Amino acid sequence: MRNVTMVAIGVLQFLAPLQMIRASEMVIFRNPGDGNLRPWVVTWTRLEGAAFVAMGLGRDRIAAPPRAVFALFGVPALVAPRRFFGLMRRLVYADPDALEMRRGFVLLARLFGLAYLLLGIGRYPRKERDD
Protein backbone atom coordinates (compact mmCIF):
# COMPACT_ATOMS: atom_id res chain seq x y z
CA MET A 1 0.00 0.00 0.00
CA ARG A 2 2.88 2.34 0.82
CA ASN A 3 4.30 1.86 -2.66
CA VAL A 4 0.98 2.61 -4.34
CA THR A 5 0.62 5.78 -2.26
CA MET A 6 4.15 6.94 -3.08
CA VAL A 7 3.65 6.31 -6.79
CA ALA A 8 0.26 8.08 -6.78
CA ILE A 9 1.67 11.14 -5.00
CA GLY A 10 4.66 11.16 -7.33
CA VAL A 11 2.53 10.96 -10.46
CA LEU A 12 0.32 13.81 -9.22
CA GLN A 13 3.36 15.94 -8.42
CA PHE A 14 4.89 15.22 -11.80
CA LEU A 15 1.75 15.78 -13.89
CA ALA A 16 0.12 18.58 -11.88
CA PRO A 17 2.89 20.32 -9.91
CA LEU A 18 1.18 23.69 -9.61
CA GLN A 19 -2.03 22.13 -8.30
CA MET A 20 -0.04 20.14 -5.72
CA ILE A 21 1.80 23.30 -4.65
CA ARG A 22 -1.49 25.20 -4.30
CA ALA A 23 -3.00 22.36 -2.25
CA SER A 24 0.05 22.44 0.06
CA GLU A 25 -0.28 26.20 0.40
CA MET A 26 -3.87 25.78 1.60
CA VAL A 27 -2.63 23.55 4.42
CA ILE A 28 0.42 25.64 5.39
CA PHE A 29 -0.64 29.27 4.97
CA ARG A 30 -3.49 31.40 6.30
CA ASN A 31 -3.48 33.33 3.04
CA PRO A 32 -2.69 30.79 0.30
CA GLY A 33 -2.10 32.20 -3.14
CA ASP A 34 -0.75 35.55 -1.90
CA GLY A 35 2.87 34.59 -2.58
CA ASN A 36 4.57 34.55 -5.97
CA LEU A 37 6.44 31.31 -6.63
CA ARG A 38 9.93 31.46 -8.03
CA PRO A 39 10.19 29.89 -11.53
CA TRP A 40 12.25 26.85 -10.50
CA VAL A 41 9.73 25.58 -7.91
CA VAL A 42 7.49 23.81 -10.44
CA THR A 43 10.50 21.95 -11.87
CA TRP A 44 11.64 20.98 -8.35
CA THR A 45 8.14 19.65 -7.60
CA ARG A 46 8.25 17.52 -10.75
CA LEU A 47 11.67 16.15 -9.76
CA GLU A 48 10.35 15.34 -6.30
CA GLY A 49 7.42 13.54 -7.93
CA ALA A 50 9.79 11.49 -10.09
CA ALA A 51 11.76 10.56 -6.95
CA PHE A 52 8.57 9.41 -5.23
CA VAL A 53 7.71 7.24 -8.23
CA ALA A 54 11.21 5.72 -8.31
CA MET A 55 11.09 4.95 -4.58
CA GLY A 56 7.55 3.59 -4.82
CA LEU A 57 8.51 1.27 -7.65
CA GLY A 58 11.48 0.00 -5.66
CA ARG A 59 14.14 1.43 -7.95
CA ASP A 60 16.74 1.75 -5.20
CA ARG A 61 19.67 2.51 -7.50
CA ILE A 62 17.79 5.39 -9.11
CA ALA A 63 16.23 6.55 -5.84
CA ALA A 64 19.42 6.55 -3.70
CA PRO A 65 20.44 10.18 -4.44
CA PRO A 66 16.94 11.56 -3.81
CA ARG A 67 16.80 9.63 -0.54
CA ALA A 68 19.79 11.63 0.70
CA VAL A 69 18.03 14.87 -0.24
CA PHE A 70 14.85 13.76 1.55
CA ALA A 71 16.87 13.04 4.70
CA LEU A 72 18.68 16.39 4.46
CA PHE A 73 15.34 18.19 4.26
CA GLY A 74 13.74 16.05 6.95
CA VAL A 75 16.21 16.67 9.78
CA PRO A 76 15.94 20.48 10.01
CA ALA A 77 12.17 20.36 9.43
CA LEU A 78 11.88 17.98 12.37
CA VAL A 79 14.32 19.74 14.70
CA ALA A 80 13.80 23.44 13.90
CA PRO A 81 10.59 23.73 11.86
CA ARG A 82 10.06 27.50 12.18
CA ARG A 83 13.58 28.33 11.11
CA PHE A 84 13.68 25.71 8.34
CA PHE A 85 10.35 26.65 6.80
CA GLY A 86 11.14 30.34 7.17
CA LEU A 87 14.22 29.72 5.04
CA MET A 88 12.30 27.57 2.59
CA ARG A 89 9.61 30.24 2.28
CA ARG A 90 12.33 32.74 1.31
CA LEU A 91 13.78 30.34 -1.25
CA VAL A 92 10.45 29.34 -2.80
CA TYR A 93 8.63 32.69 -2.91
CA ALA A 94 9.71 36.00 -4.40
CA ASP A 95 7.68 37.80 -1.71
CA PRO A 96 7.90 35.52 1.33
CA ASP A 97 6.65 38.09 3.84
CA ALA A 98 3.27 38.15 2.08
CA LEU A 99 2.49 34.67 3.46
CA GLU A 100 1.41 33.86 7.02
CA MET A 101 1.87 30.40 8.47
CA ARG A 102 -1.15 28.67 10.00
CA ARG A 103 -1.37 28.26 13.75
CA GLY A 104 -0.83 24.45 13.88
CA PHE A 105 2.02 24.68 11.42
CA VAL A 106 4.81 23.49 13.75
CA LEU A 107 3.21 20.07 14.31
CA LEU A 108 2.62 19.62 10.58
CA ALA A 109 6.18 20.70 9.85
CA ARG A 110 7.57 18.18 12.32
CA LEU A 111 5.44 15.40 10.80
CA PHE A 112 6.68 16.41 7.35
CA GLY A 113 10.26 16.34 8.64
CA LEU A 114 9.83 12.92 10.23
CA ALA A 115 8.26 11.49 7.07
CA TYR A 116 11.04 12.85 4.87
CA LEU A 117 13.73 11.65 7.26
CA LEU A 118 12.25 8.15 7.30
CA LEU A 119 11.97 8.16 3.51
CA GLY A 120 15.52 9.38 3.24
CA ILE A 121 17.07 6.75 5.43
CA GLY A 122 14.80 4.06 4.08
CA ARG A 123 13.37 3.09 7.47
CA TYR A 124 9.73 2.61 6.76
CA PRO A 125 7.71 -0.57 7.05
CA ARG A 126 8.70 -2.96 4.31
CA LYS A 127 6.82 -5.92 3.04
CA GLU A 128 8.84 -9.13 3.16
CA ARG A 129 9.63 -10.55 -0.26
CA ASP A 130 9.32 -14.21 -1.11
CA ASP A 131 12.34 -14.61 -3.38
Image (cartoon, rainbow, N blue to C red):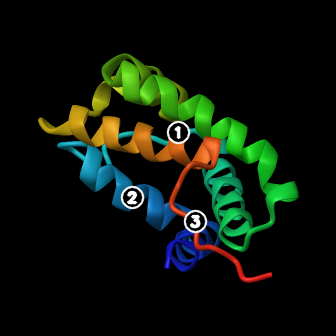
Q: Determine which residue is flagged by label 2.
A: 22
| Coordinates of residue 105 in the picture (x, y in percent) | 22, 37
* Contact, mark 2 vs mark 1 (Cβ under 8 Å): no
Please tell me whether mark 2 sits on a helix, a strand or a loop. Answer: helix
Residue 9 in the image, given as x and y percentages of width and height: 52, 70
Label placed on residue 76: none
> Callout 2, which amino acid?
Arg
**Looking at the image, which is closer to me, 45 or 97?**
45
Q: Can residue 52 be seen at all in this image of the molecule?
A: yes
SS class of the residue under badge 3? Answer: loop
Relative vertical location of residue 126 with respect to residue 61 in this rendering, above or below: below
Instruction: Return the residue nearer the eye: 108 or 122.
Output: 122
Front-most of 26 and 73? 73
Q: Nearer the viewer, mark 1 or mark 3?
A: 3
Q: Which residue type carries mark 3?
A: Arg
Residue at 52 percent across and 39 percent down: it is: 117
Which circle's residue, 3 or 2, is located before the other in the chain? 2
- Does dot 1 land on a helix, a strand or a loop? helix
Q: Are marks 1 and 3 in contact (CB under 8 Å)?
A: no
Front disc: 2 or 1:
1
Label 1 crowding class (10 Å Cα cut-off): few <14, some 14-19, many 20+?
Answer: many
Q: CA distance from mark 2 to mark 1?
A: 23 Å
Task: Check disc 3: other Cα within 10 Å, few if <14, some if 14-19, many if 20+.
Answer: few
Within 10 Å of disc 2 (Cα), the crowding (few <14, some 14-19, many 20+) is: few
Give the side of residue 103 with respect to residue 18, left or right: left
Indicate the amino acid at tag 1: Leu
The reply, left or right, for residue 118 in relation to residue 85 is right
Which residue position is annotated with label 3? 126
Q: Please name the residue shown 36% across and 54% down the image.
A: 24
